[in-house]
Amino acid sequence: MASKPKSILEDWLPDRPLPWLAGFALLYVVVFLVQDRISGLVDVLPGRIAVVFLPAFVRVVAVVVAGLAGAAGISLGSVVINAVLYQQPWEIAGAVAIASGLGVFLSYWTLRMAFGEKLALTLPMLMVLAVLYSAFNAMIHGLAWELLGFDQQATMADLALMMVGDLAGVVLAFALLSLFLRRLPLFAKPVNK
């Protein structure tokens, strides 16, 4: 007997979405706080654009691992960062949260629509996802900032730097994670003697 095809919602949510949502929200806040500590070294437009944005890595991993629950976790983490920690007005925190989760979700959705069930998450495909995410994220944040009427309008050059920073954050974090995992005995390659 053939199984009933999954709905889009079933396909995009893990079996237990709330732990994934909460876990990625917490991870996003923690990595964002690390980013905040190094912001003086990497920020181009203080508080908004960095040449290396490490939380971008968490965004990509969240949506690949937990789909819609991961993207929602990123949005929740963003609300915590902007409304609670930075005490931004709720409309700003909400708009930034939507932009933060939507960019990465749309990039992964685009890949899933293009490749369907054949989507294999190889390193080259993760890099394609990172590039797509970087472009979507910069466009959506730029649009959100424009709609919110921020005093310091982001120029196209600023948004291009945001794309570079997101991509650099994803690539750097993947590289650091890869180096770390290679040091663990479980993942280390055996030495032939």
Image: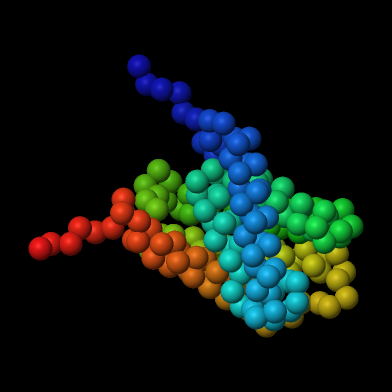
Outermost residue toward the left?
193
- The structure residue drawn at horizontal position 61% and vertical position 44%, both measured from the top left corner, is 23
Looking at the picture, tell me which residue is in the foreground, 184 or 121.
Answer: 184
Tell me if residue 85 can be seen: yes
Residue 111 placement, left or right of 153: left
- Residue shown at 87% from the left, 69% from the top: 149
Colouring scheme applied when the structure was drawn: rainbow
Question: In this rendering, is residue 146 above or below 51?
Answer: above
| Left or right of 30 in this view: 191 | left
Front-most of residues 84 and 128: 84
**Residue 39 pos. (x, y %):** 68, 74
Relative horizontal placement of residue 185, taking residue 166 as reference (left or right)? left
Q: In this view, does 123 lie to the left or right of 28?
A: left
Name the spot of residue 5 as percent of width and height, x first. Answer: 46, 28
Q: In which quarter of the image is the N terminus?
A: top left
**Total count of labels:** 0
Q: Quadrant of the C terminus?
A: bottom left
Can residue 107 be seen here? The reply is no
Residue furthest to the top in view is 1
Residue 177 location, x and y as percent? Answer: 44, 61
Residue at point 82% right, 61% down? Answer: 86
Q: Name which residue lies at 50% across and 65% down.
A: 173
Q: Is residue 140 above or below residue 70?
A: below
